[in-house]
């Protein structure tokens, strides 16, 4: 992606974590980094 992330890039993940759909997620690290960990 060759750019720094913006708040808008993270918003979808944050929103999901605030919903009841994420109620079974505990103790996880959710990486939202545009794929830089795979380089």
Image (cartoon, rainbow, N blue to C red):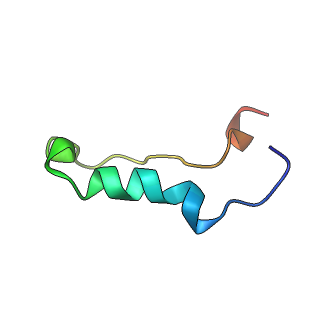
Q: Nearer the viewer, residue 6 or 30?
A: 6
Query: Which residue is pictured at 85% across the width and 48% down the height?
Result: 2
Q: Is residue 20 left or right of residue 29?
A: left
Q: Which residue is the extreme one toward the right?
A: 2
Answer left or right for 25 relative to 23.
Answer: right
- Residue 21, position as x, y percentages in the image: 18, 42
Judged left or right of residue 17, residue 36 is: right
Horizontal and vertical percent position of residue 22: 21, 45
Closest to the observer: 26 or 20?
Answer: 20
| Residue plotted at (20% across, 53% down) | 19
Q: Residue furthest front?
A: 8
Name of the residue lying farthest toward the bottom: 7
The quadrant of the image that shows the N terminus is top right
Instruction: Decide if residue 12 is on the left or right side of residue 2.
Output: left
Q: Quadrant of the C terminus?
A: top right
Q: Nearer the viewer, residue 5 or 29?
A: 5
Tally of numbered discs: 0
Q: Is residue 15 above or below residue 36?
A: below
Q: Residue at x 52, y 46 (%)?
A: 31
Q: Point out residue 9 in the picture as x, y percentages from the top left corner.
A: 58, 55
What residue appears at the point 29 percent right and 53 percent down from the top-left corner? Answer: 17
């Amino acid at each position: 992606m060759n750019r720094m992330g913006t708040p808008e890039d993270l918003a979808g993940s944050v929103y999901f974590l605030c919903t009841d759909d994420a109620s079974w997620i505990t103790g996880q690290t959710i990486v939202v980094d545009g794929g830089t960990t795979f380089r």
